[in-house]
Amino acid sequence: MGQVTSEQVVKGNGAGPNGQSSATVKSYAPATGELLGEAPNMGPDEVRAIVARAKRAQEAWGALSIEERCERVLRFRDAIVDRADEIIDLLSRECGKPRHEALLHEVMVVADIATFFTKVAPQALAPREVPLHLMKHRRSFLHYGPRGVIGVISPWNYPFQLPLRDVLLAVIAGNAAVLKPSEVTPLIALKAKEVWDGAGLPEDVFQVVTGYGPTGAALIDAGIQLCVFTGGVSTGKRVAAACGERLIPCVMELGGKAPLIACADADIERTAQAIVFGGFSNAGQVCISVERVYAHKQVHDRILDRAVEITRGLRQGDPSKDFVDVGAIIFPHQIDVAEKHIKDALEKGATLKVGGKRRKGEGQFFEPTILAGCSHDMTVMTQEIFGPVVPFMQVDSEDEAIRLANESHLGLNAYVFTADRDRGHRLAERVQAGSVLVNDVLSNGGTAETPFGGIKQSGFGRVLGEDSLREMCDVRHISTDRVRMTGKDPLWYPYSETSYKWFKKGLRALFSSGNILRRIGDMF
Ligand code: NDP
């Protein structure tokens, strides 16, 4: 027990605690420092063997009808709901998040994703005919078949929702899935696997490989057919390069720096509440957190004051013991990052309005923090913080706010607050982000129907939405003749001067402007 030190858990060093390669991955509770358990640190041979097993299991799984697969996935969903208490308890302890968030943002979202996609999958993945505008004598059909084994590499901040989202989509579409969870949250991934097995589903269709970064790299190299990666930009670049090297397609869900634009007519109370919830939910460790506020000068002070007041009332502590609002920070490095950005901002003239300190004593806690008077020469406004820090900047106009919001290398989520929802919609269209919410925050992270993902360095490809189900598939185009064809096609051999002239006339008739009848007449 006691505070976890950087020596105990250093995330992202690619090998293990203290940089050495260790036989196990140790999981500590961020709120108490308690050692919760260990998982094997799997090497390339183990990972390859697991992917090979997944491949074999996929053949039988993929051969089931989609209705049969959906029925089995719903059994998994029911088992999750039945065992919600133990999942929430582990999420709260391993990730340090409040139980409300473990329930609403993890377990409930997974249950909803399973429900929604099992409902829409039979239709979404059914063969569809594509009408041909030119080759009327033929019919074209698209068939969506499983790719094989999908590798899912996921981060620690939503260690149940994010990986299971991708795993569910993969298996509903007929694939097997192999998940590499973050090194700091292996136990919740193993719990998901335990629930899957307990529900009587084929064990090798969903498997987990635990370890550090190299285990993730080994997964990419083990014969998967698609990699769905969620994580930071720098790891994402390495993963995309590794996939490129092997010509494996990938979906990249990377970091964010979500701006919140408060227009002159924004509702003060709703905007302030949204900033606090959007900035401090999951202790700010959310890729779509409110990471910077641009408030119009007419409302800036009132929103800032109210946000500070609400923040002062938040209760922070060990979420496994109490119903707190804000939990712990996953590992010490994240606190160092927050402190570094705050220090830079204060040195350059920002004002600390509330928070700003790590809590002494047991566990890793950082106070929800609001900074005012920020500008774009401070890193707090330009780099992803991934902690409970919200910087405010006052702007003179909405145009200025949009310009600043777009002045970023990231583009995942963005938020616009205004009393005029039509204006909000128009402003939203000008913001460079994968999703823009008007008068709301965070809610699209788990909306099953709508695609989620980023632009710029926030990544590419989308998860959620029906298209993401098809993304898990190889698309096969099958073309048949509409009427019985005999002999040779007019487009085939032999080529002659006469046929060339007719095709040339055809080019003009088909593809030039003007009256269609006259163009056809011109052929003769
Ligand atoms: P990382 O990028 O550090 O890690 C993500 C995953 O990649 C982990 O499982 C990690 O394993 C693994 N990994 C590390 N190195 C390699 C490698 N060389 N090859 C393959 N896999 C590797 O991210 P964090 O876990 O720290 O998560 C925080 C980041 O995730 C933030 O930037 C956040 O914005 C982003 N994120 C994006 C979301 C989105 O939907 N766009 C959603 C949630 C978070 P290990 O942990 O063992 O090192």
Image (spheres, helix red, strand yellow):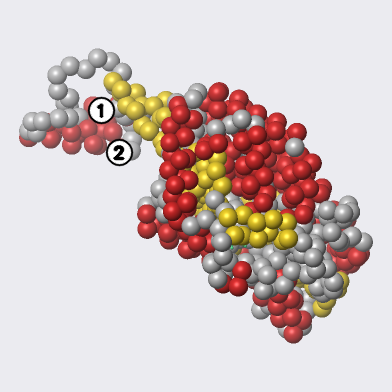
Residue 506 visible somewhere in the drawing? yes
When the figure is inspected, residue 192 is found, relative to residue 289, above or below; the finding is above
Where residue 172 sits: x, y (%)? Answer: 55, 33
- Residue at figure coordinates x 58%, y 55% from the top left: 40
**Residue identifier under label 1:** 520
- Circle 2 packing at 10 Å, graded few (<14), some (14-19), many (20+), is few
Where residue 174 sits: x, y (%)? Answer: 49, 33
Q: Is mark 1 on a helix, strand or loop?
A: helix
When asked about the image quadrant of residue 313, the answer is bottom right
Q: Do the residues labelled 1 and 2 touch (CB within 8 Å)?
A: no
- Residue at figure coordinates x 53%, y 62% from the top left: 213
Instruction: Return the disc, 1 or 2, that comes first in the chain's sequence.
Output: 2
Q: Looking at the picture, which amino acid does disc 1 mark?
A: Ile
Give residue 512's mark. Answer: 2
Viewer-proximal residue, 130 or 504?
Answer: 130
- Residue at figure coordinates x 42%, y 59% from the top left: 242
Q: Is mark 2 on a helix, strand or loop?
A: loop
Q: Residue furthest front?
A: 23
When asked about the image quadrant of residue 494, the answer is top left
Viewer-proximal residue, 515 or 27?
Answer: 27
